[in-house]
Amino acid sequence: MKITDAYVIVTCPARNFVTLKIRTDEGVYGVGDATLNGRELAVASYLTDHVIPCLIGRDPHDIEDIWQYLYKGAYWRRGPVTMSAIAAVDTALWDIKAKVAGLPLYQLLGGKSRNGVMVYAHANGQTVDDALDQVQHYVDQGYKAIRIQAGVPGLKGVYGVAKGINYEPATRGLPAESAWSTEAYLDFAPTLFAAARERFGWDLHLLHDVHHRLTPIEAARLGKSLEPYRLFWMEDPTPAENQDAFRLIRQHTTTPLAVGEVFNTIWDAKDLIQNQLIDYIRTTVVHAGGISHLRRIANLAELYQIRTGSHGATDLSPICMGAALHFDLWVPNFGIQERMVHEDVTDSVFPHAYTFDQGYMHPGEAPGHGVDIDEAEAAKYPYQPAYLPVARLTDGTLWSW
């Protein structure tokens, strides 16, 4: 079997997605997600101009060799653009291999380690009551774990807080800007979770995302103040470029820590894992070099009793979600999977085999990773520039992640 053709599809059904399609001389094809929120066209060009010419004529079954070739052969390693491109190739090749075998992808990874994948939803609101009403919405759907975010009194446009059950954090046009006050947030956050526990009790897993907006000592203070409410995790408490920063947080709180959605390689997570400074590693299929490299990260984490908790917002296409669910079903040290529901128009472009029921998802039994792209539908939705917002302190200082 040989790779005869490969091309990139950029489409915007509700938001922008970049998809790589690899074809073979035996008629089997595979698809991979290459979406990098706010930098989509950079990955599309990387694939079209630099990667695809290197794939033609290769045996698609040589997944490991192709991965090493694309990672080491470029000389300029790592980074989100490079690793998202490699991830798209890797995911598409695993899709092909599983289709040829006539098996769902998780079987090729080693079979299932569980019967379903526990996922968490996003509940958010401008006020505490609004946020808790959304929690109730998800509880009624059977979710066992819910992330809660709420607007901070006195601040407008807090990131991750919007009206409606389904929301898209990225905005069309240039990045929006919002004001941020760490002091107001630190005083407010514990009241949100006190209200959540009072209303929903202790059987529900509660999660919270800090969006990298605290210094290490501020994050330590927040973690300590949230201890009485027994969070499943506190996510991205501080920027992780300095991995040692998590040591200070760890010294002051027993609230579990999760990080890694912006990580691209095992090297980004190495010290955090080996020094047991986190409890959940949130690296993704698309941004961390595909299934092959994500497996290496999970294997390292398993040695230190650290579990997976992969990012799964709508800035990842259904292709990434499908691949992630196969990975989640297999990986022995699974923790939880994030789930934001894609809009109907997105699902029409990306038909998929995965399903949701009572707080759990399953990737399905279709050969491959079970997600495809309808190119005719995709063509109806051209690319539209969109970016995540940035935050400034009330004095104007840039304070985004």
Image (cartoon, rainbow, N blue to C red):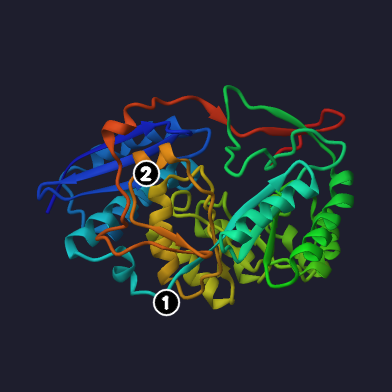
Of residue 62 and residue 6, the one placed in the foreground of this image is 6
Q: Position of residue 248 (x, y in %)?
A: 79, 63
Secondary structure found at label 2: loop
Residue at point 57%, 49% (across, down): 262
Q: Which residue is mark 2?
A: 74
Of residue 302 and residue 37, the one placed in the foreground of this image is 37
Q: Position of residue 331 (x, y in %)?
A: 44, 71
Q: Residues within 10 Å of mark 1 (few under 14, many from 20)?
A: some
Q: Position of residue 310 (x, y in %)?
A: 53, 58
- Name the residue at the left extreme: 26
Q: Which residue is mark 1?
A: 113
Of residue 264 and residue 74, the one placed in the foreground of this image is 264
Give the mark toward the camera: 2 or 1: 1
Q: Is residue 364 above or below residue 395?
A: below
Q: Position of residue 318 (x, y in %)?
A: 41, 48
Tell me whether the residue at label 2 lies in contact with that at label 1, contact meaning CB atoms closer than 8 angstroms.
Answer: no
Residue at point 74%, 46% (across, down): 130
> Which of the 4 image quadrants contains residue 174?
top right
Q: Quadrant of the N terminus?
A: bottom left
Secondary structure found at label 1: loop
Q: Distance from label 2 to label 1 (Cα)?
A: 36 Å
Q: Quadrant of the C terminus?
A: top right
Q: Amino acid at mark 1?
A: Ser
Q: Residues within 10 Å of mark 2 (few under 14, many from 20)?
A: few
Mark before the other along the chain sequence, 2 or 1: 2
Residue at point 51%, 70% (across, down): 334
Q: Is residue 138 visible?
A: yes
The tally of labels here is 2
> Which of the 4 image quadrants contains residue 269?
bottom right
Q: Amino acid at mark 2?
A: Ala
